[in-house]
Image (cartoon, rainbow, N blue to C red):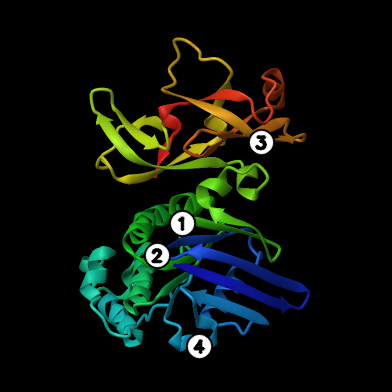
Amino acid sequence: MALEIAVEHRRRDFVVTAQFSAPAPGITVLFGPSGAGKSTVLAAVAGLLRADHARVALNGERLDRLPPHRRRIGMVFQDGRLFPHLNVERNLVYGLRRSPGGQVLPGDMADLLDLRKLMRRRISSLSGGERQRVAIGRALLSQPRLLLMDEPLASLDGPRRLEIMPYLQRLRDTLRMPVLYVTHATDEVYRLADQVVLMEAGQVIAAGPLPELAARVDLALAARDDAAGVLLGYVHRHEPERGLTSVACGGEVYLVPLCDIPTGDSVRLRIPAREVILALDAPRNISVNNIIPAVVSAIRFDEKTHAALVEIDVGGGQLLSRITTDAAERLHLRPGVRVLGMIKSMSVELL
């Protein structure tokens, strides 16, 4: 099962050329700076833009051959686009007008998005995060086979973005449908993406699973100050007496601060590049809990900042380490060199 997209469109002297495939179900994040062409791709997929060329196939069916209202595509915009004269419940019910029929009811969506207490409220009385939850619920009640989200958190301030993020993660883990999600915020990429499509100046630079692209030293994610590696794993065990939880990722186990996630549940770890220390030999009497054997895969040097970005293979995936050029030269780092990646438990973000 897969979603296949090919879009070509020219606007004056700006050309968007995007071709990629994405898993279905799963969240595919289109990431890049403003003006990269991300929203143009979404508009072409939805049929809201008559592109010069567009091919959209879901599980082999050509959606681009259908008029927009028959594609069964849900859309969530930055501003929600709710009806201010209707309360929350009636906004949700409106989504059923486009539904082909089925078992999903407004009450079910209210439970999924924690909207029960808001059903009688006017839209004007809601916070930005609450309005976006209603907009998502309305889109899902139309029972789409594909959901498009165009920077749904861009209009929210920091606290409101943190408020809605758990609901988006819940949707990712609960829904069995493909989602195309546009953003230029890296925290949304790390928390939500299964697949990433990196766009720049109208072109697709790279596309693939998040753990692979996040750690590639030649791509935009790794070049940022907040660059990080992402590992997929599961909660292995809890050690309350030590205040730690162990997470298994591939063949390695990482210790993180004690959490309440049930044993066996899938999780992802985000490990900032600036927090990964490299060594050739195991140190003694050190406070770092995670000392992971690794192999250097690639190195990129930045002459302006006198920094080296080192990609390492840790067995269960790839991580990044940002160190000084001097450190890289002292350790004689190059692809193939065996090192130890040392990571404090407090530096690991459990997503």
Comparing labels 2 and 4, the label whose residue is closer to the camera = 4
**Residue 66, numbered label:** 4
Q: What residue does disc 3 label? A: 298
**Residue 128, numbered label:** 2
Q: What residue does disc 1 label? A: 157
Which element is circle 1 on?
A: loop
In the displayed structure, 286 sits above or below 350; it is above
Mark 1, other Cα within 10 Å: few <14 / some 14–19 / many ≥20: few
As measured in the structure, the alpha-carbon distance from the residue carrying label 2 to the one carrying label 1 is 9 Å
Residue 236 drawn at (x, y percent): 30, 35
Answer with the quarter of the image where residue 130 lies.
bottom left
> Along the polypeptide, which appears first: circle 2 or circle 1?
2
As measured in the structure, the alpha-carbon distance from the residue carrying label 1 to the one carrying label 4 is 37 Å
Amino acid carrying mark 2 in the image: Gly
Q: Quadrant of the C terminus?
A: top left
> Along the polypeptide, which appears first: circle 2 or circle 4?
4
Amino acid carrying mark 3 in the image: Ala
> Along the polypeptide, which appears first: circle 1 or circle 4?
4
Comparing labels 1 and 4, the label whose residue is closer to the camera = 4
As measured in the structure, the alpha-carbon distance from the residue carrying label 3 to the one carrying label 1 is 37 Å
Q: Nearer the viewer, residue 18 or 121?
A: 18
> Along the polypeptide, which appears first: circle 3 or circle 4?
4
Q: Measuring 28% from the left and 27% from the top, which residue is drawn there? A: 243
Which element is circle 3 on?
A: strand
Query: Mark 4 and mark 2 in contact (Cβ < 8 Å)?
Result: no
Comparing labels 2 and 3, the label whose residue is closer to the camera = 3
Residue 23 drawn at (x, y percent): 47, 62
In the displayed structure, 300 sits above or below 40; it is above
Which element is circle 4 on?
A: loop
Comparing labels 3 and 1, the label whose residue is closer to the camera = 3
Q: Quadrant of the N terminus?
A: bottom left
Mark 3, other Cα within 10 Å: few <14 / some 14–19 / many ≥20: some
